[in-house]
Image (spheres, rainbow, N blue to C red):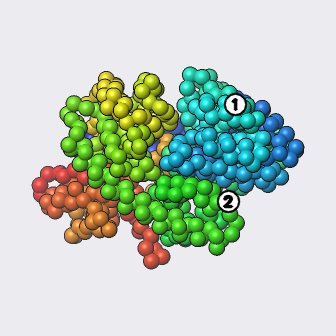
Amino acid sequence: MEKIWKIKHASPEAVAEIQNEFKLPEIYARVMVLRGIFSRNDSRKFFYSDKTRLHDPFLLEGMNRAVEKILNIIDSHKIILVFGDYDVDGTTGTSMLTLFLSELGAEVHYYIPNRESEGYGVSIEGIDFAHSIGASLMITCDCGINAFKQIDHANRLGIDVIVTDHHKPDDKLPDALAILNPNLTDSPYPFKGLCGAGVAFKLALAICEQREIDPQLAWKHANLIALGIAADLVPVTDENRIIVCEGLKQISEGKNTGIQALLKTSGMLDTAITVGKLVFWIAPKVNAAGRLGDAARAVKLLTTGNPVYAMGLAKELEWENKKRQDITKQIVDEAILKVNMECDLDNENAIVLASSGWHQGVIGIVASRIREVYNRPVFIISIINGSGKGSGRSIPGFDLYDALKSCGEILTGFGGHPVAAGLSVEEGNIGEFKRRFIRQANQLISRDDLCPFIYADGELDMGQIDGRFIKFLDSMSPYGPGNMRPKFVSRNVKVNGIPKVLGKERDTIKFYVKSGRSELEAIGFKMIDQFEKLLLNRPIDIAFEIGENHWNGSSTIQLEVKDIKVGLAT
């Protein structure tokens, strides 16, 4: 599908003011204004990370009750169980709380549910485990906001529950001792973009404040929270940006043995670590623990101080992630065939696919890939023994959680975010769910919404891409949702030399572009469908991000191309 390019709007007056204030070229000022920098004060907040600017953790409703209970449990030498979701957000939050509470002298254990046998969220099995070890308190990480029956079960067993979560709540809340969630209705907490691990981190900071303990006891685990923030794709803005800045610094200094092992097995030990690298190289291996096996291995890896043990686990997850990639590719291929056979894309603005042969551990990744290909909301459902488990991904402007809520009476469970959600459904109701979901998508999504857009920060003359501009772009990091790496458009550039096809799948293109005296290397990942455009002997327009290629100890500027349009014949 042909992508539409749009240049983001930036107030000309604001851009001119930033130009004059900082004595910068116009493109620099545009990039700053588009990220909300309109003054020197804004600039200081953006460019200089300050831990003291985090919001008061006691603004989270229930925090006082939660802290009081935890400190009472520790002082009484009773047992705490931390129950975490099996994804990266849940396992990093669980790891942080386990380490932090242990350092306070608590007897703390953790539990991560099995993805296939227990499913998403708080499980009865986990609560029974807490009871079997004599736990008086259970703290959830990245789950629990809709665990009504499970928390009632815990209460009957005499186990108090503190929920730390960030998912959207239902109309009512479970009967927990305390619920910490910035997205509760009418919550006074000023930042809604915390991930599950971030909420757990705020709990640790509140405990430090209440006990007058050095907050560094919590901050020393910012590397784990940064990994959770990156993996959960929450905004890298506000206090998340501050946490990520500190966390990336700790990762580069090798502060966590497990993360170091993952970096080594990924061949990234001596490279600059970014949010993007965490998302694409480290998070999938942490997730692999729960996709094809026991997700508790992720917590074991992230909490160990033994480098030999950590390396053994990291190698195990590296192998499982490769296996996961093979399984994912097979299911993606099958899903595309099903789209061609079963879907009426001319009249359906969403895709729902179901099969009894699909591995439940990878359906979220498959949903993401199918959404990328067809640019519309997608649900992929795996059926086992008459029950379906589904994972969905959406496009901007269509709220998956709200869509699932309206289908609630035919689902056995659901939860998630506007852009990513999960469900469970009996096999006999899948057809009805598909009809209702597509009907909602058709009502709320226009055909124009289905056109893929590339939003660029501005048009750029390639002659402006120099060392100073690279340093400026580096200073805008860490990048991520809410502060994505800037995209630019350069027009009427020449393809120089012979383009190449690279990669294991032979789907990456590499070429050189020239404009005036400037010649730069360009690479397009998974853009083999655009290769022929490079062979037409015509000028091209390119949309791209600016990166660096590190090879044999040297670095060169590299354009990471996102789209190509053919210009006029020469």
Q: Reading the chain from its start, which is encountered first: label 2 or label 1?
A: 1
Q: Which mark is residue 246?
A: none
Left or right position of 520 against 469? left
Quarter occupied by residue 46: top right
Q: CA distance from mark 2 to mark 1?
A: 27 Å
Q: Nearer the viewer, residue 354 or 540?
A: 354
Residue farthest to the front, as pictured: 385
Residue in view at x 21 percent, y 60 percent: 531
Looking at the picture, which amino acid does disc 2 mark?
Thr
Looking at the picture, which amino acid does disc 1 mark?
Ala
Quarter occupied by residue 3: top left
> Can residue 244 be spotted in the picture?
no
Residue in view at x 28 percent, y 32 percent: 349
Left or right position of 490 against 12? left
Q: Which mark is residue 303?
A: 2
x then y, percent, for residue 436: 34, 26
Give SS at disc 2: helix
Q: Which mark is residue 176?
A: 1
> Can residue 439 be spotted in the picture?
yes
Q: Nearer the viewer, residue 21 or 318?
A: 318
x then y, percent, for residue 216: 76, 52
Q: Residues within 10 Å of mark 1 (few under 14, many from 20)?
A: many
x then y, percent, for residue 23: 50, 48
Evaluate if marks 2 and 1 touch, with contact meaning CB atoms under 8 Å apart: no
